[in-house]
Amino acid sequence: MPDAPPRLADLQRGPRIHFTCDGQTIVAYGGETIAVALLAAGHRTLRVAPRTGAPRGLFCAMGVCFDCVMHVEGQAGVRTCLTPVQDGMVVRSRTP
Amino acid sequence: MRRTELLVVGAGPAGLAAAAEGARAGIRVLVIDENLQPGGQIYRQTPPEFRFVPPPRRTDDFRKGRALIAEALAAGVELRLGCTAWASFEPGIMDVIDAAGPDRIHAQRTILAIGACDRPAPVPGWTLPGVFTVGGAQALLKGQRILPGRRVLLGGVGPLLLVVASQLSDAGADVVAVAEPAPWWAGAAILPALAREWPLLRDGIRYRAGLAWQGVPWLSRTAVTRIDGNDRVTGAVVARVDRDWRPVAGSERRFEVDAVAIGYGLLPSIDLPRICGCALEYDVVARAWSPARNDVFESTVPGVFVVGDGAGVAGAIVAMEEGRIAGLTAAQQLGRSGGTEYDRRVALHRRRIAALERFRLAVNRAYALRSGLFELADSRTVACRCEEVTFDDLEQAVLDGADTLAVLKSFTRCGMGPCQGRMCAAATTEWLAARTGRDPESIGVLPAAPPAKPVVTLDALASSG
């Protein structure tokens, strides 16, 4: 996605890996959090708010606000700003 | 159940310094932190999978953090990372959870060093993806080496705003402007308090000069008043503000951006101290609650200390000095450190804290928040992000008689969601105080109840037996 914010090139990241978000394959690098891998892929919306359906994304990026919570490997309410991405991980924006 | 002599919650500057002192004095110290790397916010480290190719510029905080982590480990401190403290149902026992499941840590002394979080101000559009807190934007940059966006607008006040604007611009973000409702001389008013603090003074001047050199507009007496977009940020509006920070009609300017960072200073994280039963006090200048402490930073709960920004925002240097005093004192109370050496060390660290107290007061005075800031939201703006409570909902609750934060919560669910009020309580307090013509202190705090962070699943608790 052309308008995604860039990863800085001043360091070497971990190995290239893949995971899926709502069925779509996303490229990530070892050491990245789920939310950051999605941001770098141009996915700013991580979930929709339950009442109004408003889109929500990363906000505090430090585990305080819980706006970035997603369904990760079968578990709901996971803070994707703190959770490192792993190869083959299955991430969903809503609980199936 | 785990047993230790000293439990430190938080592996930032305050926690690591406290732990190092305790361990060197000969007590068993366990430090827990919910991040996977120690360092906290200011000394945030990159994950072990990341390797710096050339050492990047301005990595002072990274290096200082690494040195402090090394000091704590060399002293014999045990670090348990990815571990969240969520409750304390009995004095001296902390309920925690990590990847292995829930656990209870029994400690003779506890030092809470959990830091602070950003104070956002709600404006229309502030829940859109692409809006970050100022500290959040910095966390992405420091810990993950990614920009929050390509074209970024920053809005807020205080030292962190300056630091983050400068770091983002240096890293290659197109920082379209920094909007700060304080007057242009607010930053200059702090300088005399830094007369004997050359490194801090030098950094501040460097950051401002760097931004000017890069052509980043610094808009004083200006606030971010609205953020636009459908499913993500596409633009934001700033307006000139008057002395009370109320927007001046006709002064609006719009910027096309893909990210906005907002932060009006920092708020001590009081969730865990409150769950531990620590009494709070209100600082009228900082407009914030923090745990009440004695002169060795012990809270109103015997054996529980609170240090660092989580006890009143004063920065990393003060945080470490407070941590050292608390660590030494915990060891002294357990019969290890003591005598004249203890007195000498405590006096030494106290002098350093006293010297920096001028800086803290100058910052709080120069960036004292004004009432117009809390009127920028409109009736449909979300006040409580978790429960999607709007200012219209709050208004209805006030008409129904809500006059404290606790009652407002019970009427509207404001502050009841997973963030436990960390993102909304301060702004809602200011709004309710203005709306009811009372002072913020009398609005009170949200009722404290575990979990401090809803990371505990019933399944996990059940399986732990």
Image (cartoon, grey):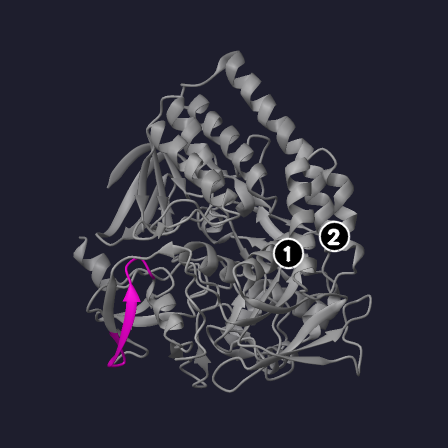
Query: Are the two marked residues, 2 and 1, in contact with CB atoms closer than 8 angstroms?
Result: yes
Tell me which residue sits at (44%, 68%) in the image: A6
Q: Which residues are magenta?
A: A20-32
Rendering quarter of residue B10:
top left
In the shown orientation, is residue B372 left or right of residue B296?
right
Image coords of residue A80 (percent x, y): 35, 66
Image coords of residue A54 (percent x, y): 46, 83
Please state the chain letter of the residue tagged with numbered disc 2 in the rendered image: B
Cα distance between the residues tagged 2 and 1: 10 Å
Q: Identify the mark at residue B187; answer none if there is no mark.
A: 2
Disc 1 residue type (three-letter): Leu
Rendering quarter of residue A1:
bottom left
Q: Nearer the viewer, residue B450 or A14?
A: A14
Q: Magenta span: helix, strand or loop, mainly?
A: strand
Residue B410 inside the magenta-drawn segment? no
Which residue is most to the top?
B340
In the shown orientation, is residue B422 left or right of residue B195?
left
Q: Helix, strand or loop at disc 1?
A: helix
Q: Nearer the viewer, residue A62 or B334?
A: A62
Residue occupied by mark 1: B162
Image coords of residue B323 (percent x, y): 50, 34
Disc 2 residue type (three-letter): Gly
- The reply to whether residue A90 is visible in this rendering is no
Same-subunit check for callouts 2 and 1:
yes
Q: Residues within 10 Å of mark 2 (few under 14, many from 20)?
A: many
Q: Identify the mark at residue A5; answer none if there is no mark.
A: none
Q: Earlier in the sequence, mark 2 or mark 1?
A: 1
